[in-house]
Image: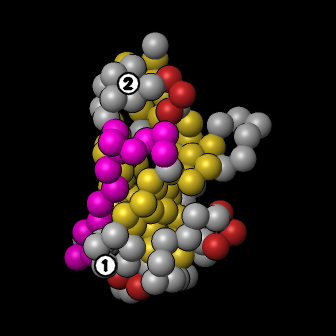
Amino acid sequence: QVQLVESGGGLVQAGGSLRISCAASTGTFSNYAIGWFRQAPGKEREFVAGIMRTGSFTVYTDSVKGRFTISRDNAKNTVDLQMNSLKPEDADVYYCAAAYQWGIPGAENEYDYWGQGTQVTVSS
């Protein structure tokens, strides 16, 4: 069982930056690919970024490329998502998820564990 806890969400002005984190309670954190998803009310959960078990490979959805950076520290069991140049359309609840896979799944149903989410609000 893996428990994931997100933190760092909040209110930021458009153009600003925010760093959100995901902390995992497992001794085998390095066995999991980690993904960040976001979801707006009434919409499906959207893949935002993912990072491989070792941290050596990352992937991003097109709308955040060049603005968001995902990173992980396997010694601390944490994954961060640095979000720069935020836009109002980035405002959502952000979730981290863990997948027991070598690759980085893009589909929600390929992830085994989920956090409860952290709210990101971007004012225009």
Residue 70 falls inside the magenta stretch? yes
Work out which residue is located at the far top of the displayed protein and give it.
124
Q: Residue at x 34, y 70 (%)?
A: 57
Q: Give residue 6's quadrant in the image.
A: bottom left
Q: Residue at x 56, y 41 (%)?
A: 93
Q: Is residue 91 above or below residue 123?
A: below
The kind of secondary structure element at disc 2 is strand
Q: Amino acid at mark 2?
A: Val
Horizontal and vertical percent position of residue 58: 37, 64
Q: Which residues are magenta?
A: 62-75
Q: Quadrant of the N terminus?
A: bottom right
Work out which residue is located at the far front of the displayed protein and give it.
62
Q: Is residue 54 above or below residue 46?
A: below
Q: Is residue 54 above or below residue 35?
A: below
- Binning the other alpha carbons within 10 Å of mark 2 as few (below 14), some (14 to 19) or many (20 upward) gives some
Q: Is residue 94 toward the left or the right of residue 86 in the image?
A: right
Q: Look at mark 1 in the image and give the residue it sits on.
A: 54
Q: Residue at x 65, y 37 (%)?
A: 40
Horizontal and vertical percent position of residue 120: 48, 35
The kind of secondary structure element at disc 1 is loop
Residue 39 falls inside the magenta stretch? no
Residue 78 visible at all: no
Query: What colour scheme was applied to this rendering of the protein?
Result: secondary structure
Q: Amino acid at mark 1?
A: Thr
Q: Look at mark 2 in the image and give the residue it sits on.
A: 12
Residue 77 visible at all: yes
